[in-house]
Amino acid sequence: MIDKEALAKLMAASGVSVNADDVDAVSRSLEPIQSAAATLLQPLSFDETGEHFFRLLEADAANGAGQ
């Protein structure tokens, strides 16, 4: 889960003026990235790595990712 207060502070510190809608939009955008990173950080055996990668691609394609 994204800490929206910390995200708002980070965005404001970069010189961007933000409102609650902006923070919500960025948070929603970051959630799938965070989920994917957590999935990719799971330890895999060497033999399983390629197969796992292609399963992730298939799952993304089925969910319409990248459109």
Image (cartoon, helix red, strand yellow):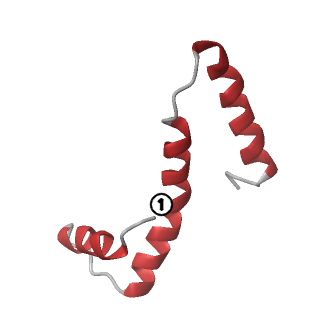
The residue depicted at 67 percent of the width and 51 percent of the height is 66
User: On the picture, is 10 further left or further right than 26?
Assistant: left
Query: Closer to the camera, 61 or 36?
Result: 36
Q: Is residue 18 above or below residue 47?
A: below
| Residue 53 location (% of width, % of height) | 66, 29
- Tell me the residue at 48%/36% (across/down): 41
Which residue occupies 32% across, 69% down? 7
What x and y, as percent, mark residue 24? 46, 78
Report crowding for label 1: few under 14, some 14 to 19, many 20 or more residues within 10 A (C-alpha).
Answer: some
Instruction: Pick the residue in front: 31 or 43.
Output: 43
Task: Tell me where residue 2 sits by quadrant.
Answer: bottom left
Quadrant holding the C terminus: bottom right
Asked where in the image residue 5 lies, by quadrant, the reply is bottom left
Q: Which of 37 and 21 is in front in this view?
A: 37
Task: Identify the residue under disc 1.
Answer: 30
Position of residue 24 relative to residue 43, above or below, is below
Which kind of residue does numbered mark 1 sit on?
Leu
For residue 59, above or below residue 65: above
Instruction: Please provide percent x and percent y for residue 9.
Output: 23, 73
